[in-house]
Image (cartoon, grey):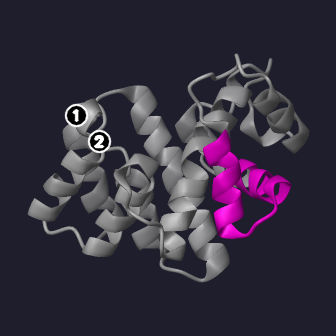
Amino acid sequence: MTRDEALAILKEYTQSESLLKHAYAVEAAMRAYAKKFGEDEELWGAVGLLHDFDYEKFPDEHPMKGNEILKEKGVPEEIRTAIMGHASYTGVPRETLMAKTLYAVDELSGFIVAVTLVRPNKAVSEVKVKSVKKKMKDKSFAAKVNRDEIREGAEELGIPFEEHVEFMIKALSGVAEQLGLNP
């Protein structure tokens, strides 16, 4: 699946600017990890773009409804399975490195964006790991973000938490302009 194909599906179902930016952030993180692991950057990027494509229209059926739609569109099973696994409540195990990575980057990318947006200069490239860790302790900050899933994701990847956060900051810095995080 190409980026253009994934982007077309994403934009067919998603209008929200913040949800689109989240998809771009997760795509960037997935591509960065694919490169690090020697995997297919295009495939992993597509997974990042599509992981929440159905959320806006079908929030109560996400990602099950999205899985049905993607199956009808002929999207490969490995993409659909990784997407299903990013939501723990589906019960779909994360057995591939791609699926584990999606789980690891999803919540953390949103959290890093939130940390960036409360900084005076709103530049993701200047966010520090210690700032992310400090904000994680503040339960009222980005309260809907599941901190346990953020930590579990790094554990499933077998990457120390601080290293994972640092890697994610660098990955998001690469698309900072697209995310509106590069003043």
Is 146 on the left-hand or right-hand side of 83? right
**In the image, what residue occupies the spot 63% across and 79% down?**
37
Which quarter shows the C terminus?
top right
Q: Which residue is mark 1?
A: 58
Q: Which mark is residue 167?
A: none
Is 106 on the left-hand or right-hand side of 60? right
How dense is the environment of label 1, judged by Cα within 10 Å: few (below 14), some, or many (20 and up)?
some
Picture quadrant where residue 182 is located: top right
Q: Secondary structure at mark 2?
A: loop
**Percent coordinates x, y for residue 139 in the rendering:** 72, 22
Residue furthest out toward the right = 130
Query: How many labels were placed on the picture?
Result: 2
Q: Main secondary structure of the magenta part?
A: helix
Q: Looking at this view, is 113 or 82 the one in front?
A: 82
Which quarter shows the N terminus?
bottom left
* Mark 2 residue type: His
**In the image, what residue occupies the spot 65% across and 35% down?**
111
* Mark 1 residue type: Phe
Q: Disc 2 to disc 1, how far (Cα)?
A: 6 Å
**In the image, what residue occupies the spot 58% across and 37% down?**
110
**Percent coordinates x, y for residue 43 in the rendering:** 40, 71
Q: Secondary structure at mark 1?
A: loop
Picture quadrant where residue 125 is located: top right
Looking at the picture, does residue 150 appear above or below residue 17? below
Q: Looking at this view, is 147 or 54 the one in front?
A: 147
Looking at the picture, does residue 51 appear above or below residue 124? below
Q: Which residue is mark 2?
A: 62
The segment highlighted magenta reads 148-169
**Percent coordinates x, y for residue 54 in the rendering:** 26, 41
**In the image, what residue occupies the spot 73% across and 37% down?**
124
Looking at the picture, does residue 18 appear above or below residue 174? above
- Whether pointer 2 and pointer 1 mark residues with C-beta atoms closer than 8 Å, the reply is yes
